[in-house]
Amino acid sequence: MYDFFKTLLFIPLVRWFFRASITGTENLPATGGALVASNHLSAGDTFVLPAMLSRKLTFPAKAELFRGDRGLGSKLVAWFLKAIKMVPLDRSGGRASLEGLAPVLNVLHEGGLVGIYPEGTRSPDGRLYKGHSGVARMALAANVPIIPVAMFDTQTVRRLGIPWISRPRIVIGEPLDFSRFADQHDDHALLRWVTDEVMAAIQELSGQTYVDAYGSSVKRGSLSPAEADARILPRPGYGATPPPAVLGGLS
């Protein structure tokens, strides 16, 4: 069903009507497990990116979306997620729980591509926000590379009342190899360093201003716009001291 929807619906929509473009496809491994980590500008990211990749891209979704127990709309969402073989992410034990990440790790171990938005939510203002360390935990636990991706111009506009995306762009960066830290997925300082390195690679591709705060805190209102402005840094992890585990692994 994934190939059915991708070939008959999303590829024509994204490539022919939205006129999307992509560069850096040579950086995407032809085979083997990998994490594709992207900035997150809009809901359109979730179908523009898969439509432009030759390989299947599996996105983890909140486990509750697979239950379909909140009316007809939720049943359709649950059916669609299952039909295209997305995987549930159980966050009841905490975002970083390996138990909750098990379905995602299975895809990686089986040689699949997994897409993830480390910010955890869409950017509230187009800037790049602090990444959650789940991306690092998954990469180290599965011992797979992380492919940084920058999305551009995926925000939806309306043309004659119809939602539309005009000429979105995708840039794929070179793979990030953290295999020297494989299985050190319980070292919190290391997870933060790896996550910041991933976000820095995304920022280098996207050119976005970086805010050292979670985007969700701005959306909830617990962090004011002025407070967010005060947390702008030149890059993720700026001024931080790499943990000893990192220093020992560097050449």
Image (cartoon, grey):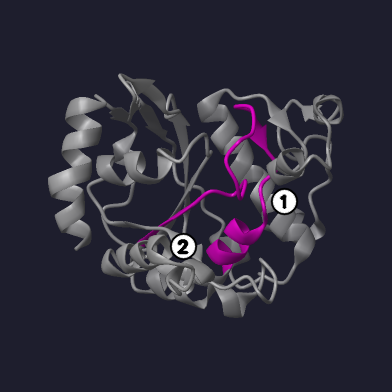
* Residue 207 in which image quadrant: top right
Badge 1: how crowded within 10 Å, few (<14), some, or many (20+)? many
Q: Does residue 251 appear anywhere in the picture?
A: no
* Residue 138 horizontal side relative to residue 25, left or right: right
Labels 1 and 2: the sequence-earlier one: 2
At horizontal 28% and vertical 59% (from top left) the residue drawn is: 31
At horizontal 61% and vertical 76% (from top left) the residue drawn is: 98
Q: Which stretch is magenta?
A: 113-140
Residue 1: image x %, image y %? 19, 63
User: For mark 1, what is the residue?
Assistant: 193
Which type of secondary structure does the marked residue at label 1 adopt?
helix
Residue 153: image x %, image y %? 43, 24
* Nearest the eye: 222 or 52: 222
* 128 within the magenta span: yes
Is residue 176 shown above or below 80? above
Extreme residue in the front direction: 71
* 125 within the magenta span: yes
Q: Does residue 145 appear anywhere in the picture?
A: yes
User: For mark 2, what is the residue?
Assistant: 60
At horizontal 70% and vertical 59% (from top left) the residue drawn is: 191
Which type of secondary structure does the marked residue at label 2 adopt?
strand
Amino acid type shown at disc 1:
Trp
* Residue 102 horizontal side relative to residue 185, left or right: left
* Residue 94 horizontal side relative to residue 161, left or right: right
Give the CA distance from mark 1 to mark 2: 23 Å
Badge 2: how crowded within 10 Å, few (<14), some, or many (20+)? many
Foreground label between 1 and 2: 2
Residue 145 tag number: none
Asked if the residue under mark 2 is in contact with the one under mark 1, i.e. CB atoms within 8 Å, the reply is no
